[in-house]
Amino acid sequence: MSAILLSPVAQQEEAPVSLWRDAWYRLKRNKLAVFGLAVVLILAFAAIFGPYLTPYDYLSQDLQARNAVPSLAHLFGTDDLGRDVFSRVVYGTRTAFLVAVIVTVIAVFIGTLLGAIAGFFGNPFDRVIMWLTDMTMSVPNLLLVVVINASLKSPITKWMEAQYLATLNPFYRQTIWVDFMLVFGSMALISWPPYARLVRAQVLSIRSRPYITAAQALGLSNWIIMKRYVIPNALGPLIVSVSAGLGTAMVLESAFSFLGVGVNPPTPSWGNMISDGLRVWQHYPHLLAAPAAVLGLASVAFSFLGDGLNDALNPRGSK
């Protein structure tokens, strides 16, 4: 009986090829992307658990330690009310992540749904949705946010005060929820058009593929085809856009809070902390440097991570 000799290469089973596994290997080789991912994970940990680990409450005041410089007792110093700046920056991380994640989720959901409908079904849906997208993008972001806050905040606040007087429920005195609701709504309203354009372009390319034609020949409905085949295959570029969108949402929230149309004190936000520190930065530079440095680090980290994901998921387009 003759034995059949196989070479070691032939005997070795080939590892299964996976797009996501290959993308992860390419991402790990990108040092800047790994740095960005590490910073994002640290900020996410601080947003979730940081307020329970900080040495002081973010509202706790010590008037005898007003405007103290950074020290072992107060790592980032204290503000004009004696509040620990490090504790407030950490709690501001929760505010930034909460706004960024919720706004991005809402914007991605709206943009993906409208972009997929426009790209897959074509006219007249495409014409109407793209007109709505162009109209939304043509309005200045700051102007739209200011109009929404100026027109809705006062009526909602008065309604909550009336409800408190009628029910004595302390929930209606927590106007921070009004700030968050207006910030979420207004930022999501200005953030969905880029996602819609991106998904539409991907769907226009995907809908002519042979497997889409085969699915239609099998009698599958358009909604099932979109759910099973079109949208999943458009997720690669969308993930890259979302990673960059999270950083953009953080910067936008800080900018709106800086201008007084976002999250208002006493709730810590990097934007309103920068606004407060800007007034006294010549005498107490730590009040401006601490939140500004963390915001800049978060923005750079998301930018590095977005570039790394783009190179990992689209290796042909990388340099």
Image (cartoon, grey):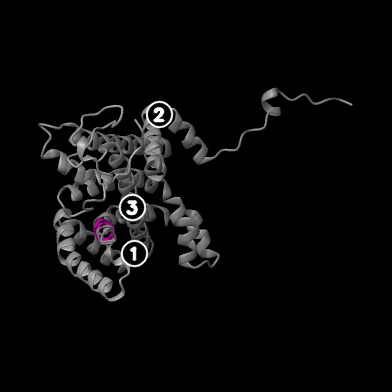
Which is closer to the viewer, label 3 or label 2?
3
| Residue 66 x, y percent position in the rendering | 19, 37
User: Would you call the spot at circle 3 few (<14 residues within 10 Å), some (14-19), or many (20 or more)?
Assistant: many
Q: CA distance from mark 3 to mark 2?
A: 25 Å
| Residue mark closest to the camera, 2 vs 1 | 2
Quarter where residue 318 is shown: top left
Asked if labels 1 and 3 touch by Cβ distance under 8 angstroms, the answer is: no
On the rendered image, what quadrant is the C terminus found in? top left
Secondary structure under the numbered disc 1 in the rendered image: loop
Cα gap from disc 3 to disc 1, whole angstroms: 26 Å
Q: Relative to residue 144, is residue 291 depicted above or below?
A: above
Please tell me whether residue 183 belongs to the stretch shown in magenta.
yes
Quickly name the residue at label 2: 30
Of mark 3 and mark 1, the one earlier in the sequence is 3
Q: What residue sits 25% from the left and 59% below the top? A: 189
According to the image, label 1 marks what residue?
Answer: 122
Residue type for callout 1: Gly
**Residue lying at 37% horizontally and 65% vertically, measured from the top left:** 121
Specify start and end residues of the magenta stretch as a single range.
181-188
Q: Residue at x 26, y 65 (%)?
A: 127
Label 2 residue SS = loop
Q: Nearer the viewer, residue 173 or 109?
A: 173
Residue that label 3 marks: 104
